[in-house]
Amino acid sequence: MEKSKSAATAQSGSDVILSVRNLKKHFPITSGFIIQRQVGAVRAVDDVSFDVIRGETLGLVGESGCGKSTTGRAILQLHKPTAGNVLFEGKELTTMAPPDMRRMRRQMQIIFQDPFASLNPRMTVGSIISEPLQIHNIYPNKTERQDFVESLLQRVGLNPYFINRYPHEFSGGQRQRIGIARALALSPSFIVCDEPISALDVSIQAQVVNLLEDLQQELGLTYLFIAHDLSMVRHICDRVAVMYLGKIVELGRTDEVYDNPLHPYTQALLSAVPVPDPTVEEKRQRIIIRGDLPSPANPPLGCNFNTRCPVEFELCHHAPDPELIEVTPGHWAACHRVTQY
């Protein structure tokens, strides 16, 4: 087993498009009415490191409140990180000047979770999709811009005649397609998909995921796919990172993580995923996680997972939080029991 130097790095020779190192995002807790002072901090993202390889889909999974969406937004600098480094195409984003960051945003976009809240209800579909084109002065000619917007609508499976309609005239699945079209408008190379199917009907989810896969193949896109639907993550993702209380506890190739989960939290998550074969389902052992998710403002001493872990032992309570260790080639885990035995 090889100890990590603060990061689960990509394999040697791979083309890394995004490199995240020791990323932290802490939200201050203040007290007082007139003179406010900081009395604590919510550690939403706490020392996260990983690489994203060009052309892949990296899944980021975990239960609600573990810091998945905050990680995605901190990478795009929508939340300013408290500490750490984010390198995109070899360029450091955390210290980049605002004009340079604006130009960089052409290459990195986000698809939001809620298709109802992420679209301005007072703007037509054409205005929503063309807004980033106007901001970055792409297609200054109005006719050319409208033709491009209509072609984007067709690409995401919508009728180009919808260009003058408003968001309230569409279903949830159609609105999410509009959000995807807006993300594609600037021809980015990297897209954060922030739970893009969680607000949709089950019958529509597969259509949107298939659309994302088709667009990835056509345009050579790279995705950070944030989700809590583990069966969908296995379908779409090349690698998967499991988060718990602001930290990555396991990372590896999707099939390796699903077939041989190392961390007790990953094992518990996967045991809750239903299997369509009733014979297999009957023989499976269900792992129940006790208790509730601790507050990120007051995480447990030692390992973050020790208050709920079914296999915790003395070291988990006294030793520092375990580092991410490469247990087998390309498969990383942060667990004292895995690394000690």
Image: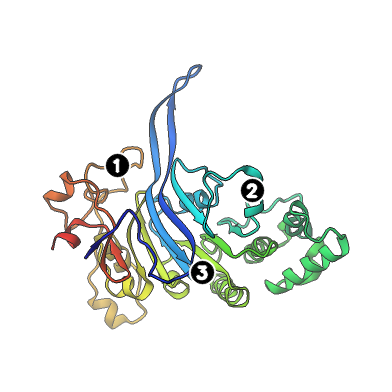
Q: Secondary structure at mark 1?
A: loop
Residue 23 percent coordinates (x, y): 42, 48
Q: Amino acid at mark 2?
A: Asp
* Location of residue 228 by image quarter: bottom left
Q: Secondary structure at mark 2?
A: helix
The image quadrant where one finds the C terminus is bottom left
Q: Secondary structure at mark 3?
A: loop
Residue 75 percent coordinates (x, y): 50, 52
- Mark 3 or 2: in front is 2
Residue in view at x 81 percent, y 61 percent: 139
Residue 143 percent coordinates (x, y): 88, 64
Pick the front one: 202 or 44: 44
Within 10 Å of the Cα at label 1, are there few (<14), some (14-19), or many (20+) other Cα atoms? some
Q: Amino acid at mark 3?
A: Arg
In this rendering, would 176 be left or right of 315?
right
Give the Cα separation between the discs numbered 1 and 3.
34 Å
* Location of residue 148 by image quarter: bottom right
Mark sitting earlier along the chain (1/2): 2
Q: Are discs 3 and 2 less than 8 Å apart at CB?
A: no
Q: Amino acid at mark 1?
A: Pro
Q: Are discs 1 and 2 less than 8 Å apart at CB?
A: no
- Mark 1 or 3: in front is 3
* Residue receiving disc 1: 299
Pick the front one: 99 or 257: 99
Label at residue 100: 2
Pick the front one: 85 or 317: 85
